[in-house]
Image: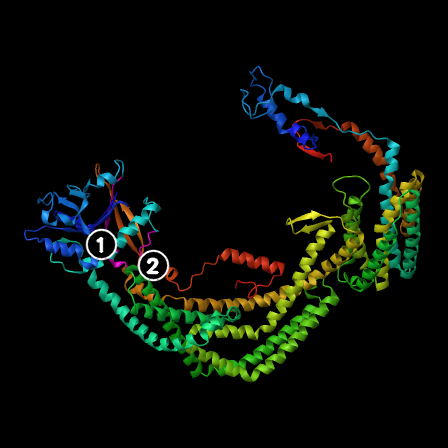
Amino acid sequence: MLDRADCTGVTLQHRSLHTCVSSPYLQTEVLQTTVPHTSTMPWRKVLYEDQGCPDNYVDSSFLEQLQKNLNTRSYDYWNTVYESGAVTDHISATCLFVVTFVYLEAGVLSPKLLILLTVASCFLGYIAYAACTVHLGETVHKSHLWIVIRSAVVFLLFTYSLSPILYTLTESVSTDTIYAMTVFMFAGNILVFDYGTTAAIVSESTSFNLAMFGSMCLASRLTTVLHTFSIVSFAVEVFALWPELRRKVQATHRGCKMGVSCGSVLVSVCAVWSVSTVGAVLLGLVHFVVTFLCPRWLIQLQPYKNNIQGPWDEVSIVDKM
Amino acid sequence: MKVFLPRCCLPAKSGWLVGWQDLDQKIVCVFSVLHPTQGLKTSEVQTLLQSKLHTGTYKLGILGKWVNSTAKDSVGDVPSNSISNLLQDCWVEMTKEDTDIPHVDPQGSWNNHLTQSEPQILIIYDQAHILKSDFKVVSNQSDGDSVNSAEQSDFDVAFSALRFHRQFFEKEWGLRLTHSTSISNKRVSVTSCILTPVWTLLCLIQLATRTTFRICRRSCFSRVCQNELMCSVLQYPTISSQVALRIRHLNAVCIHGEASEGKESSHCNDQQYRGRVCDHALSLVLDVFLGVAVFLFLSKGNYTKKLATNLIPFADYVATELQDLLHWLMGAPAGLKLNRPLDEFLGRFFLYHIQLWIGYLYILRPYLELITWCIGLSGCLGLSVLLALASDTLSMLTFHIYCFYVYAARLYRLQLYGLGSLWRLFRGKKWNPLRQRVDSCQYNVDQLFLGTLLFTILLFLLPTTALYYVVFTAFRMAVLTLQGALTKVITTISSFPLFSVLLQLCNGESMAGGITFQVLPQVAGRPLCLSVQVVPVTIATVLERHSLQQTTQDELTSWSMLGTKLLTGDLIYPWGGNRP
């Protein structure tokens, strides 16, 4: 089977089996070793030949192919701390958005000012984005600007035209329900956000949609059309544009990444401080745990890793092409 | 090998077996025992066997010899040479000794056809019962005893052979024969006392309708029927489909009249067909009779006028109630979390429709009395036509409810479908129509943003739309239930097999409901012996089997389909198909 697979340009790898205790193969081995394999030929793991033993016979040579912890990576503590910046960045951005909403609802921040800030930061952000692109040595297409403008027009047009519906949408629903929904949505957003890993749970579109749904729930609690419009535009900036820009900026230099992460942590903690002290302390704790304790924990857990690989695994197909 | 022996032949004296046999199907069907007397003439036997009545598929002949050793008389080994040309080349000797079960001994060519291990089955039947059962014996009720389904066809063959030679039993032959003779008289008398008035009635109907039919068929009627568009339009009002059904029934009666003038069809089919035609005719007559009675009742008590005068206030009352309901819905009914702007918009929209509806009723008011009188008059065409017209009038009067239902259902369905596809977008998936499955898909940010925006809006507006949908669907279902009940009555009237039911009540034996077998106690060295009994048919079976409309609709699937349609907001009857 392996030979045939190689001919077609495909290699087969045995995927690791994480649960060794519940493996049915090992149990059969225990049961069946009492029946000896009498033939002079070495036992082969095939069923199509009569080898003079029952079908469920497992030879003692079976476990010789067992391999442990094949794909283990060793982690460097400070490197892990450095990479965890992506998570703190995103948490900070979400907190900043929530604080903005609190200000808007309290009437401290006027929606016009927020719109102005959003537009200004958009321009600045685009210039920074272009600069980073040039710095990274990537070519900037002229059509890219048009795509950006078109997207911006779509955002603004639809947000503005649907805001009148949005701001009365959840009028009859209780505020607590909406806040609970928003909390779940943002938590889901933080959970499935694309931090640069390739896990099954990561889904860029779902995370963005969850964030937008949560922010629209919040927006529907506001009182005027302009409030709704401003908070939705701000949500688009925070959840769609800022991660793009952040990735671009952080790719330019190692120091930049550190700076952006520290800056956003500081800004978010300060912003939350202005709303609630307990919240700020909690946020600081969360940042601390995510940045320093979680990497330590990850590294401490490494010795417990016990993956076994062997011929009993399902084959996984790796395409060479 | 199966031997069918009449019960009355068991105690008979020795003689020759007369009947019919089939070598391929290995059936020997004994009709009678012919006792050779001193003065037996060959010609008489010849007339018996080669009578014109008995030529055809089932050829009569002398099958073999019957020896009754208890009666202490004998019969010649071989019948006289003079009638040997009547003998069939296969020969069965049946010897009855001490027990009831005779010994069966096939001889001659039978030995070539039978293998050694072939089981012999002796079937004892009641000639009178089998002959009386006019209609086809459907042997699906073999009680307990083991009879293969493959063998049932053999019974059908044998019994239809028996019935084919009915005249053999009804005629006096001047020979000493042992078979049941007392069949014919009773059958003729009872059946004819029902049949005669029915046939007279039938002739009258035929006379009356045939002339009108010929005119109609030549002119517009056939063209209307052939036009597909007309057909599809006409099938929606109950009245037109009902009238069309009745015309089809009438047509069937007339066609039978024309056919019976021409060639004679085969006996068995003819019997069934005649019963069917009588069913049609009598159900028409019953229908018209009931209809006229209802019309007379209505016109005598001046009920049509009362109905018309009471209908308008009732409709007004319904309209005000609906308006109140809409005002209630526009508030916060039962503390539901509705979207106020949409709620008010929908409420005003439906209120405007009720205004339109009231105007429509005012236009209708002067004609209402005429309409109710016309409905009463249509009773002369039959009660079913009257009810169909009433059902149509009901759907016309509740047209606003239908409209409300359609609007609400369309809105609800649109929203559901939108939510379905936007939910896939929400998860970063999309429906792939080529592979009929959900694929993951990379969307642009603006697509995602728009999708989520619409998703949020649709999700929070859904309760409002669903509320209106539920309320108006409930109204629609109430109307449909009423109409369904009317339709049920119409169907019952127009498919009621009056003739068959009467026949069952007066002469139940003539309609066989099935046959049962009883295994007689087995004696060593003798063939397996079965006793056949005809089960008289029950009223329920008659109603089911002779119903003029075959309804093969699966109740369960139609109910589950209705539920699914209601949930997804698809339109139910009439555009959806089934009526609840």
Element on which disc 1 rests: helix
Coordinates of residue A308 in the picture (x, y in percent): 70, 27
For residue B480, above or below residue B162: below
Asked if residue A291 is positioned above or below residue A112 in the image, the reply reads above
Query: In the orientation shown, which residue stands out farthest toward the left?
Result: B38
Foreground mark, 2 or 1, reads 1
Camera-side residue of B540 and B9? B9
Q: For the point 39% across and 70% down, which residue is it?
A: B251
Q: Earlier in the sequence, mark 2 or mark 1?
A: 1
Judged left or right of residue A55, residue B343 is: right
- The x and y percentages for residue B500 are 33, 64
Q: Secondary structure at mark 2?
A: loop
Q: Which residue is mark 1?
A: B127
Q: Can you say which quadrant of the picture contains the N terminus of chain A?
A: top right
In the rendered view, tell whether residue B389 sits above or below residue B80.
below
Way the structure is coloured? rainbow
Q: What percent of the width, then of the height, locates residue B22?
A: 25, 47
Q: Which residues are magenta?
A: B119-139
Q: Residues within 10 Å of mark 1 (few under 14, many from 20)?
A: many
Q: Quadrant of residue B258 in the image?
A: bottom left
Three-letter residue code for mark 2: Thr
Report the residue marked by disc 2.
B538
How far, Cα to Cα, is label 2 from label 1? 21 Å
Do the residues at discs 2 and 1 belong to one chain?
A: yes
**x%, y% of residue B107?**
19, 40
Residue B410 in sight from this viewpoint = yes
